[in-house]
Structures are given as C-alpha cells and as structure tokens.
Image: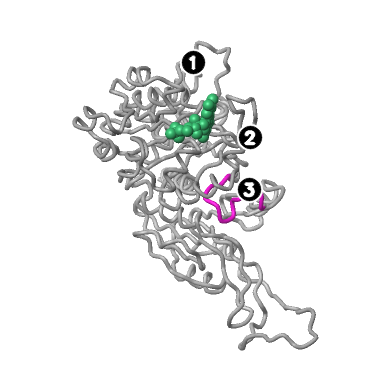
Amino acid sequence: MKLSSWLNDTGTRACDFAKAIGTTEATVSRLRHGRAQPSLDLAWRISDATGGAVTANDFMVRKSDAKLSAVETQGSNGGGDFDGKSVLLIMGGGIAAYKALDLIRRIKERGGRIRVILTEAAQEFVTPISVSALAQEKAYTDLFDLKDEAEIGHIRLAREADIIVVAPATASLMAKMAAGLADDLATATLLAADAPILLAPAMNPHMWAHAATRRNADRLMGDGVSLIGPNVGEMAESGEWGLGRMAEVPEIVAAVSTHLGGIGDGLLTGLHVLVTSGPTHEPLDPVRYVANRSSGRQGHAIAAAAHRLGARVTLVSGPTNEPDPPGVDTQHVETADQMMAAVEGALPADIAVCAAAVADWKSRAPELEKMKKQSGQETLTLTLERNPDILAALSQDPTRRPRLVIGFAAETESVVEHATRKRQAKGCDWIIANDVSSQTGIMGGSANTVHVITAAGAEAWPSMAKTQVADKLMRLAGRHMSNLAQAAE
Ligand SMILES: Cc1cc2nc3c(=O)[nH]c(=O)nc-3n(C[C@H](O)[C@H](O)[C@H](O)COP(=O)(O)O)c2cc1C
C-alpha cells in the first residue's frame, strides 16, 4: 500500500507519523509524494509503524521513473549518521567488485571515512585509481609497499577502522580467513583487526553450496564474523541463478549501520528481555534422552543482540555448545519442564522471545535405571506425554504476559501457512518462521532465512547470518516497544 494512501485512510497526520518513525515531517512529505526512497532502516520503521501495511516494496522505483532516481539512502536524521566513523572496505576478486564501488559512494554520502584494500584479484575487476577517486583516499594493495607500511601499515589500517567490510567476500578470501592465513595485505589486516568484521559473500551458487565453503562460513561465524547475504538471484558472469549473489548495496549499508550503531545505542534500555534457546533433552533413562538438532545459535544471538541494545536479558538455555553471551543472565536447563519453571521464575519481562526448540513430548515414566535389552526383544514401545507449551503459556498468561511475545516456528513445508496458524493458535504477537528441512542447512547452521509473521501478514527477510537476524529482530522489537509506549501516552 502506498504511504500516502495509508496516511489518508488512517487520518494520520504527517507530523505524528514523522515522530513515530523518528524522522522529520519534511522527509515524510517527500516519501509520501514519491520524491524520495527510504533507507532500509527507515523502511523497517515505516513497516512497523503501519503494522506492515506499507513495506519497502511500496517505495520501489520503476526504471522508467528517471526523475526519481535521486534515491535517498540517508538515515532518518537526514544523513551524516556515519559521521566520524571509519569503514575499511576489503574488496575481493569477484565480478561483484563493481557493486562495491557504489558501496564506497553510499558510505561517503553518509559522512563516513572509507579506506579500501584491493586484493590482487580484485584489481582484475576494478582499478585502484577508480576506488581511490571515489573514496578520496589512497587505495591500498600491497603488504610489502615500503611507503605504505611506513606511513600507515596494515596494523593501523586494521586498528583505525570502526568496522571492516569485506565485499565481495570471495570463496578464497573466506577460506583464508577461516584458516587464519595472512599472506597478503587483505588477510594480514583482517587477522590484525579488533573491529567487527562484516562479510558480503559473492560467488557462484555451487561454490557457496560446497561443503568447504559451508565449513568456512560456519567457522567464521563461530569466530564472531557477521555475514550479510548472499542472496538468491542471477549470477552476473554466467547467467546462472541461485544462492550466491552479493547482498545489494543498501542492505550492506544497513548492516554497517546496525553494527556502527549497535553497541549500546539504547533502543532496549530499561526493558527486560527473556529469551529461550537451544533444544530440550527429555530423559528416557539415566543415560538416554529424546532431543532435536537445535544448536541454540539463533536464540543466543538474539540474547546477545538484546544486550547490545541496552536490555537486561535473561537467557534460558537448553543444552548447547554455544558460550553464554557476555553480560546476559544465562540459566541452564535440560528439560521442557525445567525451562518452563525457569521462564516463570524470570517473569515479569517486557519482551519474550521463544527461540528454543522445546520437545513436544517427554517420556511418561523415565526409567530410574538404564534400560536393558531383553533377549529376543525386537521392538521397544515408549509412552510419551505432552510437555508444557511455553510459548502458549506466556502468550495467554492473564496477568504477566510480556507486552511483546515472539515465537519461532521451525517448519519443513508450507512454512508461512503453518506459522500463521501457529501464531493464532498460541496467541503470540509475532512468529519468526523458518524452513528447517535438511537441504536448507538452517538447523545447526550459521545462516537463517526467515519470514516474520505479524497480525499484518508475512514479510520475507533475505538470507542472512543468524547474528544479523538477531540484530534486525531486536531492533524491530525495540521500535515496536517505542510505538506501544507512544500510543499509550
Ligand atoms: C571472471 C571471474 C569471476 C570471478 N568471480 C568470483 C566470484 O564472484 N566469487 C569468488 O569467490 N571467486 C570468483 N572468481 C575467482 C577469484 O577471482 C579467485 O578465486 C581469486 O583467487 C580470489 O582472490 P581474492 O580472494 O584474493 O580476491 C572469479 C574469477 C574470474 C576469472
């Protein structure tokens, strides 16, 4: 739906709407009359404030609308939101390097300083001179350049960056990073870095799907590196189609913005966020249990993201290999009953995110001693009974319901339909639905592709790292809570 129609239909005044989405009335006026496009971040706030009635797609510019091509990619404060920030861009040798040239422009437009390192292969695709002209800085290419090393050096390049963006991140660069190699300026700088690192992988779908690349991506995410994309789409060089296309520049800019603003920007300050994560283990006897493949990565990332945004966070975690997120009160449980008790003990909360894969069933009577095979026994019958439904219990709690209850739905088919029904059945506010059929690699993997289902409908998010999903979700939740607070005033 067009923003102008929504404002007219709902009788919302531009000044009130501007306040709700944290921008100026002039920006709302330009958006309303199609004279500007919102940044991704602003589009999210608009979607949130309109209950999903107006989405980013409603601002799409048709190629024929040449006069609209002055696209506004600025933040809600009218630009300059990267002021004083230094971005180090590392360009790898892929066709998508040409898109990274635009990334340089967009970061500069927002007031950021951008330094660029090109790998040797990247220089086959774009020239240091064009990079340097756009960045208005020298382009760095050589680890053993005596002049560069004396003037700045790879350690300073790494240390003076507020964030390092690798775009395009080639399969080769990812492999080198995962292995800790440092045999050129790009990899040596990455290894010396203590700033957050954001990778925008770009490669042929077969390269992305290869077990080695999957392993490298997992390892990098385990090392704390964030990934944006890749997206599904057409491959520039081959005309092939699939998962491997570099995230679009506005998506990368939005991810950079998330990282730069993400530390303690207070969107959730003063709120208590309760998160469940991981699987549950339901004992059959003292040594055996029924479990599932949940790794806890998504739930733990959500707890960490909520903490970064200023919330007090309680994480109730089933058995996982994930480390406890720093600054988060983590309570370890094994069974669904224990998780339910810990959740109830942690209330009241302002936001609850039920990301745990809680077993639906438990053994009616777990054996006290280890079960022994009887001679000649060919089958074993287990009697299972229902576990407590934590999401439904929280959503339907008459006195202590958190103001925002978010559930997760892991589905293997008809993802959106099943999740939409689940949202209604449980009574929660949002469901984050994902396809966990084995070919997606989501269960236990580092990336996630989700649909966000609210009362207003379903919105598909592009495939991204679980840390990225977590950041985006907690920002959305933070804005939703601000809107609720404003509406209550
Ligand atoms: C035309 C062409 C396009 C390429 N595109 C990609 C790509 O999109 N992604 C990728 O991982 N490698 C791509 N490669 C292979 C890389 O350039 C090669 O692995 C190189 O060693 C990467 O070096 P770097 O990671 O140091 O930049 C491409 C190669 C050619 C010749």
Mark 1: few, some, or many residues within 10 Å (few <14, many ≥20)? some
Instruction: Identify the secondary structure beneath mark 1.
Output: loop
Given residues 236 and 393, the one toward you in this image is 236
Give the CA distance from mark 2 to mark 3.
13 Å
Q: Which mark is residue 440?
A: 3
Residue occupied by mark 2: 242
Q: Is residue 318 above or below residue 236?
A: below
User: Looking at the picture, how far across and down is residue 232, in whole percent?
Assistant: 60, 35
Q: Nearer the viewer, mark 1 or mark 3?
A: 3
Given residues 396 and 444, the one toward you in this image is 444
Instruction: Identify the secondary structure beneath mark 2.
Output: strand
Colour pattern of the rendering: one colour
Instruction: Identify the secondary structure beneath mark 3.
Output: helix
Give the CA distance from mark 2 to mark 1.
28 Å
Q: Residue at x 64, y 82 (%)?
A: 366
What kind of residue is marked 3?
Thr
Residue occupied by mark 1: 69
- Judge whether residue 440 is colored magenta: yes
Give the CA distance from mark 1 to mark 3.
36 Å
Q: Quadrant of the N terminus?
A: top right
What kind of residue is marked 1?
Ser
Q: Residue at x 61, y 50 (%)?
A: 441
What kind of residue is marked 2?
Gly
Mark 3: few, some, or many residues within 10 Å (few <14, many ≥20)? some
Residue stretch rendered in magenta on the structure: 438-450
Q: Are marks 2 and 3 in contact (CB under 8 Å)?
A: no
User: Looking at the picture, how far across and down is residue 277, in whole percent?
Assistant: 51, 61
